[in-house]
Image: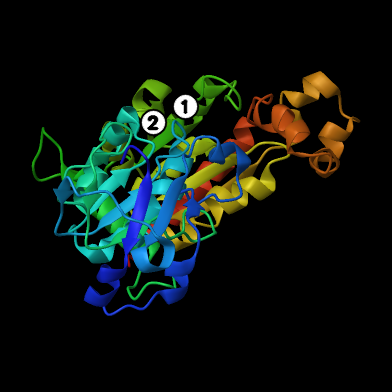
């Protein structure tokens, strides 16, 4: 563990009826067990692991003696980039699910870049994929022997997608969402379960329709809603029960997943908080507010994946007048009239402007129309449930 070296024995090949003569004669191979292989930023947070084939008669290599011998295989991975729920789910949790679900929890996790906060945050997910205590390779200096090992994780190159044709098991985003419901003890699968009439406390013979729940993801930094209070008022007037989810709530994944699981409409500006769409019940509506200059990312990161989740999607594309960038650059600047020209100059120029330097003041009439459309989608699903 301390040396982060995996030794592959020739004897284990015979036990598994495998033949790896070419691999045995190779020099040691260096692997970073994180799915974003070409992401230079991510690579800085991921330690390399040495894979060393050994056979004394071929490469004169003798492995160290086992301190601990296990009877189930191991999966070695890095916690990589943490602190951003999109990267955590997209590049660690979903790949873990794809790689490990067919082991039926009979495996050890070995985390090469162990982070206690991340492990605590996803403890329920990890414990549903493995029946064994996680091995912290950063602190455990013993030599562990396993009957087999997977170094790194399978990954589908699209965002928030659960597919992999290399594995002999079916995998869909609906499967993954069911797994999340089990891991986080979420009770609601679809909005039909939310829309059952409830009795009034004053008269048990009278029924009233439940108010649909709308969550607004509230941001403290960039891409803030500058007229958030007015947005809440509009939604309330349309009959929604509004929850304003501030970072102190959204950062608690265990608690917030239960809130989102009972939500009909989730509204948020483009950003990692929209990753919580994975907890929405089927038939719910995601309303993504797309800031100026980030339409492609909005669609590919959060919009397109909703189709695989059984979640309905509405896109609120802001106009230049709804962006704080208009006050900074004026109506005729390329930042306003030609965002593509800014992006062509490079990510390091576009990001500080459109991702880090923009706030939003929504047109309330346009916002109301979007919410009315969301209500129609909910009604349609209620009339024709899956």
Q: Are marks 2 and 1 in contact (CB under 8 Å)?
A: yes
- The quadrant holding residue 205 is top left
Residue beneath disc 2: 242
- The quadrant holding residue 246 is top left
Residue beneath disc 1: 232
The residue closer to the viewer here, 64 or 270, is 64
SS type, badge 2? strand
Label 2, residues with CA under 10 Å away: few <14, some 14-19, many ≥20: many
Above/below status of 216 relative to 306: above
- The structure residue drawn at horizontal position 44% and vertical position 34%, both measured from the top left corner, is 82
Q: Quadrant of the N terminus?
A: top left
Q: Position of residue 93 (x, y in %)?
A: 37, 48
Would you say 23 lies left or right of 298 here?
left
Q: Is residue 104 visible?
A: yes
SS type, badge 1? helix
Q: Position of residue 208 (x, y in %)?
A: 23, 43
Residue at the extreme right of the image, as rendered:
332
The residue closer to the viewer here, 24 or 122, is 24
């Amino acid at each position: 563990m301390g040396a982060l070296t995996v030794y592959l024995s020739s004897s284990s090949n015979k036990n598994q009826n495998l033949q790896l003569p070419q691999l045995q004669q190779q020099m040691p191979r260096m692997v970073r067990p994180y799915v974003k292989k070409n992401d230079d930023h991510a690579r800085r947070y991921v330690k390399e692991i040495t894979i060393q084939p050994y056979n004394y008669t071929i490469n004169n290599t003798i492995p160290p003696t086992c301190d601990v011998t296990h009877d189930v295989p191991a999966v070695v991975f890095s916690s990589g980039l943490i602190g951003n729920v999109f990267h955590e789910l997209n590049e660690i949790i979903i790949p873990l699910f794809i790689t490990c679900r067919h082991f039926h929890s009979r495996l050890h996790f070995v985390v090469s870049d162990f982070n206690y906060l991340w492990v605590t945050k996803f403890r329920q997910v990890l414990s549903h994929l493995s029946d064994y205590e996680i091995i912290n390779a950063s602190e455990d200096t013993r030599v562990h022997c396993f009957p087999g090992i997977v170094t790194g994780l399978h990954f589908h190159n699209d965002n928030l997608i659960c597919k992999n044709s290399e594995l002999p098991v079916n995998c869909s985003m609906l499967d993954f969402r069911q797994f999340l419901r089990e891991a986080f003890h979420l009770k609601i699968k679809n909005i039909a379960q939310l829309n059952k009439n409830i009795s009034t406390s004053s008269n048990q013979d009278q029924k009233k329709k439940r108010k649909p729940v709308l969550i607004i993801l509230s941001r403290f930094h960039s891409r803030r809603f500058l007229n958030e209070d007015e947005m809440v008022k509009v939604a309330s007037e349309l009959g929604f029960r509004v929850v304003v989810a501030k970072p102190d709530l959204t950062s608690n994944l265990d608690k917030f997943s239960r809130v989102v699981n009972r939500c009909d409409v989730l509204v948020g500006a483009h950003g990692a908080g929209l990753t919580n769409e994975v907890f929405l019940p089927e038939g719910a509506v995601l309303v993504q507010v797309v800031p100026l200059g980030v339409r492609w990312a909005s669609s590919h990161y959060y919009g397109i994946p909703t189709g695989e989740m059984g979640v309905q999607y509405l896109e609120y594309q802001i106009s230049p007048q709804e962006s704080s960038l208009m006050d900074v650059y004026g109506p005729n600047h390329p930042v306003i009239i030609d965002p593509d020209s800014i992006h062509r100059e490079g990510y390091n120029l576009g990001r500080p402007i459109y991702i880090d330097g923009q706030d939003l003041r929504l047109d309330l009439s346009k916002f109301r129309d979007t919410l009315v459309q969301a209500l129609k989608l909910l009604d349609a699903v209620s009339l024709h449930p899956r």
